[in-house]
Image: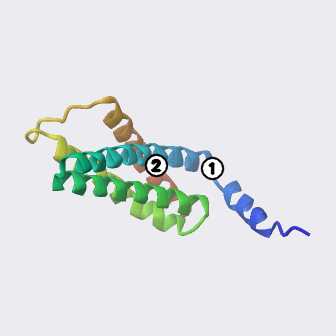
């Protein structure tokens, strides 16, 4: 006999996700993938050049990847959702602020926007809006 308690529990948690949740999950996944690509790129640069800044940037992008990924996992598994929403807002906003600060040639001049950064920043703005809505709705 097969015990499908785990499958039923997972289906129950997944069934509690609204379209707003799925928009947030999609936005977080987009940002996680962008950060993963950048992190791997910087680590590759570090292996070629040995520049410490490339190592630091690579690790920081991978940490951001982990942050977005863990947040998605907590939401999907219905663990600590209001806390995830509340922590996700400054985490994601911090990504935007750091991007601006690290990519601006001189404040207040805006940084150049390439397609990858445009997709990432759009996803992050959407994610912040979704997190605010979900936090207000569920807490």
Which is more toward the observer, 32 or 90? 32
Image depth: mark 2 or mark 1 in front = 2
Residue 97: in sight, yes or no?
Answer: no
Query: Residue furthest toward the front?
Result: 48
Snapshot colouring: rainbow
Which is more toward the observer, 39 or 136? 39
SS type, badge 1: loop
Kindly identify the residue that appears in the image at 43 percent across and 45 percent down.
33
The residue singled out by tag 2 in the image is 28
Kindly identify the residue that appears in the image at 42 percent across and 63 percent down.
86
Residue 27: % across, % down: 47, 44
Q: Quadrant of residue 77?
A: bottom right
Q: Residues within 10 Å of mark 2 (few under 14, many from 20)?
A: many
For residue 64, side relative to residue 4 (left or right): left
Residue 18 disc label: 1
Which is more toward the observer, 35 or 80? 35
Residue 83: % across, % down: 47, 68
Residue 90: % across, % down: 33, 59
Depicted 42 relative to depicted 71: above or below: above
Kindly identify the residue that appears in the image at 75 percent across and 67 percent down.
6
Which label's residue is closer to the chain start, 2 or 1?
Answer: 1
């Amino acid at each position: 006999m097969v015990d499908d308690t785990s499958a039923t529990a997972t289906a129950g948690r997944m069934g509690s996700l609204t379209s707003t949740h799925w928009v947030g999950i999609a936005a977080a996944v987009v940002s996680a993938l962008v950060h993963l690509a950048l992190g791997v790129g910087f680590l590759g640069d570090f292996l070629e050049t040995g520049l410490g800044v490339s190592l630091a940037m690579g690790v920081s992008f991978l940490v951001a990847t982990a942050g977005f990924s863990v947040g998605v996992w907590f939401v999907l598994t219905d663990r600590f959702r209001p806390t995830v929403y509340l922590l996700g807002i400054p985490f994601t906003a911090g990504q935007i602020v750091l991007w601006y600060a690290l990519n601006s040639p001189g404040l207040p001049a805006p940084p150049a926007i390439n397609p990858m950064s445009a997709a990432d920043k759009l996803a992050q703005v959407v994610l912040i809006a979704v997190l605010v809505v979900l936090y207000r709705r569920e807490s």
